[in-house]
Amino acid sequence: MIPFYAVLPEIAEAETRRITIQGDNKSLPNGEYILLEFFCDDIDCDCRRVMINVYCPEVAKKKMLATISFGWDNNELCLDPLNSQSKYAPRLLELFELILKDQMYVDRLKHHYKLFKKTVKEKMLSQKKTKTRIVKKISRNALCSCGSGKKYKKCCGK
């Protein structure tokens, strides 16, 4: 999984969802919670899934508080069992479930997925086209690389 901001930073900066918690909230500490989107970069995969890493610098400086997996084709929503979760993860999952009621946000996730896949595919294809093989030119009077002891022009260079 690759962060959306690593592939399309300008869009991620403008469109990443943030939630501000203020006041006397007993289940979540006050702070700005950032929902970072991660997508699969396998160009042959069409999983239609996003991993949301919830980060709050006021609560945990360099640690994700929750990793939420959401697949929109089957409406699968869960805390990702492969990643460690904080004590706030269950409440953050509930909060994310409420956010998913905003169809515009779900549509934005789908759009980000398509943009991400398209950009990753284009980058991979352009890398394949630009890869060139560097071949060292062998002088005809140099010794042959096969180890025969003959000059290249009289051995493998014929």
Image (cartoon, rainbow, N blue to C red):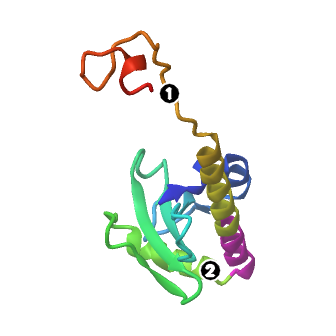
Q: x, y percentage for residue 137? A: 50, 19
The image quarter containing residue 152 is top left
Sequence-first disc among 2 and 1: 2
Nearer mark to the viewer, of 2 and 1 = 1
Q: Secondary structure at mark 1?
A: loop
Q: Residue at x 36, y 23 (%)?
A: 155
Residue matched to label 2: 100
Q: Residue at x 57, y 77 (%)?
A: 48
Q: x, y percentage for residue 119? A: 67, 56
Q: x, y percentage for residue 67? A: 43, 66
Picture quarter with the C terminus:
top left
For the residue marked with disc 1, what is the amino acid?
Answer: Val
Tell me: 77 left or right of 46: left
Q: Secondary structure at mark 2?
A: loop
The magenta span reads 102-112
Q: Count neighbours of disc 2 (C-alpha within 10 A) and say few if under 14, some if 14 to 19, many if 20 or more.
A: some
Q: Count neighbours of disc 1 (C-alpha within 10 A) and say few if under 14, some if 14 to 19, many if 20 or more.
A: few
Q: Is residue 150 above or below residue 61?
A: above
Q: Residue at x 35, y 14 (%)?
A: 151
Residue matched to label 1: 135
